[in-house]
Structures are given as C-alpha cells and as structure tokens.
Amino acid sequence: MKWFFLFLGTFTLYFIVTLILKYFIIKIEKISSNTSTLIDDLVVDLLKCIKKYFILFISFYISFSFMNVDVSYNLKIDKLLMIICAIQLIQVAGRLINFWVVKFLKIESTESGEKLASLRFMTIGLKVIVYSIIFLVMLNNLGIDVTALIAGLGVGGVAVALALQNILTDLFSSLTIVLDKPFVVGDFIVINDFMGTVEFIGIKTTRLRSISGEQLIFGNGDLLQSRIRNYKRMNERRVVQNLTVTYQTSSEMLNEIPKIVKNIVESLDSVRFDRCHFLRFQDSSLEFELVYWVESAEFNDYADKAHKINVSVFQAFSERNIEFAYPTQTLNLVNQKRDNVEFN
C-alpha cells in the first residue's frame, strides 16, 4: 500500500511543479520579446510546444520507477516512453525549423508569393528529413532492424536524384537565391550579354523584363553559374570619358584643358571630380582621360549629369578655339624635279 501512496504523491507533486514552472517561464515571454537576442525567444518557443501528455507521462514514468513490479512491465513502459519522446521530439524539431526560417532568416508574411513558396518547400523538405531520422532512430531503439529500410531509402534516393538532377539543381539554386539574395524582385541586373529587371524568382526559373520589352527566362542553376552585375545596389557611378583634341592645339592650351574640365564638373551638384589628364598620343589626336563620380545609382541621374558636362565642355572648347579630333589622315605630296636625259 505504501508503494501506491508513494507513486501517487510523487506523480502529483512532479506534475504540479512542472506545470507551474512551465507557466512562469512562458510568462517571461513579454520580457524576452523586448530583448534583441534570439536565445530567450527560442527557449520560450520550445517550451510552448511541450505537450501536457508528455509532462504527464514523464511524471508517471518517474513515479512508476518507485514501484516494485515485474520486469516485463518495465520494458513495455520503456518502449512506450521511447515512442512518446519521439513524438515530442518531432514537434520540437518542427518548431526549431520554423523558428530558424522566421527569426534567423527574417521572413515575414508580407514577402513575395514565390519567395514564400520556395521557403515553404525548403521547410517541408527539412522537416521530412529530420522526422525520418527521428523515426528510424526510434525504430532502432525499439529493437526493429532498420538496416534494410535505410538501404532501400538510400537506393531510392539516389535513383530519384539522378532522374531529377536538373530539376533539383534549379530547386536548390532557387533556395540559394532566396537565402543569399544576390538580387531580389525589382533589381536591374546584367547576365553576360543579357540585361533586364527581375520580375519573378520561382522554384525552377527566374524571369527578367529586358529594356526592349521581351521577357528573359533563365534556369536558376544556369543563372548562379554566370557572372551577375546588380546595378540596383550601386551607391554611385564612376564615369570614365575620353576627350580627344587635334595636334594643332598649343601646349599652353593643353595645360588649361584639365582646369577647364575640372571647373565644369565641380560646378554641378552630386558630382565629384576625380581627375583629368593628358594621357596618350593617338594616330590623329591627343587624348585626355576624364574621371568623375555621379553620386547616384539611377541611370537617369547619370545621363543628366553626363549631358550637362558634355555640353559645357563643347561650349568651353568652342569659345577657346580648341578643336575636337576625329580620325583623319593627311597626305603630303612633294614635287620633285627630274632632269631630262637624252639618249643618242
């Protein structure tokens, strides 16, 4: 009789204390939500997924260990504990995966539909893998031989991977794009000889709208193997421009040209002058190299500044009679007088 009261008292005490402890820990959720760390949020989130049936059975299992019963009953209780722990572990693993996707990857419900679809597919895949591992470990601990099952899953997985190699490549590439974010919808990117604005990032393909209006479709696997230039993420533009003048330009004016160009560039807002030098002799011209920065990523801003600079340079050169050079060739003919020689 004393074993029964010991079992009942221990079971009741453990169950009540565990529930009270869980209740107070969840109460600190309001405090943890105001902190910048994610560890306390994770602890509270995991405690929420602990089910009452799990606490109840753990209480029963600890209390049952004080009772003097047949060994066969202990083995059955141990197996039942293994099954219940596996079920609870699956729920904890699912909550961990969801927490990682939402908190660490900072995914919100307002994200684009295709991005949420890719992440949802990734989440389901991770859960299937983790749940399968937990299930196989549980079966092995219950005394069931899972060697043949693991071998069958391995062979089947290889066969499926070979059959769906291209699709899986594009799929994992889409996850890479979603997680690493080399570009997002709305970015203007250049891929080899193609350029356009990103319209859609799907599980298998990414679609761009080109400048001329047609839609460009790339496989995600091929896309990540290419060199991508993302113009949307520029902070400013570096402009390199060549100015060529004729060989008839005087040396004094050659020294004045960098000063003239510098004053023109510095007179504009949001433009930073870098340098202007007489760099090289060409076949039919003297070449200056002008470098300046447009403090904007927008192409229209760059085009406006370049237009104003070019017009101002043209006007300044015209006022000073500085001629722009263009490809020309000068042919000099020399008249040579030859004596007439008579032969008898």
Image (spheres, rainbow, N blue to C red):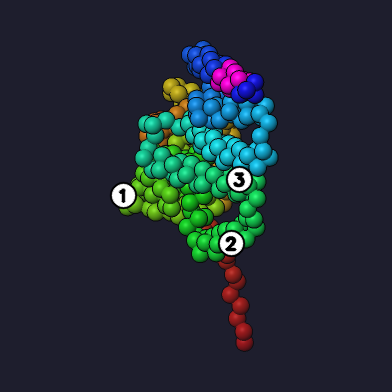
Q: Which residue is mark 2?
A: 152
**Which callout, 1 or 2, points to the residue nearer the camera?**
2
Give how far across and how far down residue 91 sits, in percent: 51, 35
Q: Which mark is residue 138?
A: 3
181, above or below 215, in the image = above
Q: Main secondary structure of the magenta part?
A: helix
- CB of mark 1 within 8 Å of CB of mark 3? no
First in sequence: mark 1 vs mark 3: 3
Viewer-side residue, 207 vs 82: 82
Query: Which residue occupies 51% across, 47% down?
Result: 128
Q: Which residues are magenta?
A: 5-15
Viewer-side residue, 86 vs 77: 77
Q: Does the magenta-highlighted stretch encompass residue 79? A: no
Mark 2 residue element: helix
Marks 1 and 2 sit apart, C-alpha to C-alpha, by 50 Å
Q: Which residue is mark 1?
A: 213
